[in-house]
Amino acid sequence: MSSKTCIESIRDIQTILKNKLDIEKITKIDITRLTAPGENYGSLILKLDLYLSSVNSVDEEIVKLVAKKIPVEQILRENFNIQITFKNEVGLYETVLPILQNFQRSHGIQNVINNVPKFFGARLNLDGNEEVTEDAVIILENLTAKGFSNVERTTGFNLESTKLILEDLAEFHAVPLALKLKQPKLFERLKKFCNTFEFKSEFHKIFWETTRAVIKEKPTCALLDNKIKLLGQIERPEVMEPFGTLVHDDLWSNNTMQKFAPNQIAVENKFLDFQFLDYGSPASDFLFFVFTSVQLGVLENNLDILISTYHNRFLKHLEVFGCDIGVFTVEKFIEEIKRESAFQIGHIINFVLFIIKTKQENVEVKILDHINIKPSLITQKAKEHIWFVIEEWNRRGWL
């Protein structure tokens, strides 16, 4: 069996699903690609339609799921370090979330964390060991079938949708932080699934020349060029307590889905893709999400509102657990932003220029393919977004 044929099939799927579904009722399983090539770099996403026989044997129930598998291309498996990152995500669903939800329930919270897809099961292989193989899979509910969708990444989120997502992000950060403060030994179990992800150094270098050219194209930004360290030129800052908590570390528009009202305002949100789960500062997720995935006009006029929205909800979640919120003031949070900004600006610039604002239609994107970094591919919209980030961060003293 070829690599591609194997990766796009799921052997012994019934064993994974037996704790969530009555597998004896499964009459047929349809498996197709859910996302187009190039839309998910670190994984292959398959659509699973399970047909279940009904009591009267006339109508069939269709259970709509998705399966997340390792990438087809070997170069992607290596660059995304699947032996670590895939295990991180399985751990998030199997261990981390249940511990956090039980912690919430133990404090009388009924509406526990629910901003992730429903989990149906996972495995690393068919051999029962710790190696991630082509039989590795995570099975989740199909959010598209439930009415969720991704915002157009070249456009980004409006103000009200951004507020909703930030409120969910505040919960995702605050609950594990509270667990760390109240039950530190239990929290250590969660840190087992936290691993700082870094691409190989040669990966970053191929972006440097084009990125510097974009920065220097605008005179006011050219004057600030020497203050900006790109990815591969600076180390991540160490985690400073007491803010250390679980962070997503890859939160942008493609890694979150929403249900939208007719006015295009999000009314429900789900976070996706936790393979880069880490222990870090909540400011890192805040900066990366806001400055990659929010509409430029929203950022220009409402950045302080977004900081307040996130921080207020963050404090409310901590208060429920009886945490001392005096050490988590907005001033302290802004200090965290300043600490994280030196690393995150390069992270943000890379994503906006090469992933988010410069979309290639009908092209299978390949990591490390030099065609994807030619200056001619950088749109004016991408440039203006980055110029705003640089000037705004300088104005706020974040550079």
Image (cartoon, grey):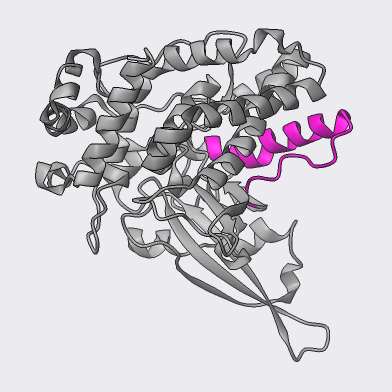
Residue occupying the point 44% across, 52% down: 134
Is residue 130 at all visible to an observer of this figure? no
Queried whether the magenta region covers residue 108, the answer comes back as: yes
Queried whether the magenta region covers residue 215, the answer comes back as: no
Left/right of residue 51 with respect to residue 359 in the rendered view: right
Left/right of residue 397 with respect to residue 274 in the rendered view: left
Residue occupying the point 65% across, 56% down: 16
Q: Determine the image quadrant of residue 297.
A: top left
Instruction: Return the residue nearer the eye: 371 or 339.
Output: 339
Magenta residues span: 88-117
For the N terminus, which image quadrant? bottom left
Instruction: Return the residue nearer the eye: 265 or 93.
Output: 265
Residue occupying the point 59% across, 26% down: 308
Residue occupying the point 73% across, 20% down: 178
Q: Determine the image quadrant of residue 212.
A: top left
Magenta stretch: dominant SS?
A: helix
Residue 142 image position (x, y, % from top left) = 58, 62
**Furthest-bottom residue in this view:** 58
Residue 249 image position (x, y, % from top left) = 47, 31
Residue 377 image position (x, y, % from top left) = 15, 48
For the C terminus, which image quadrant? top left
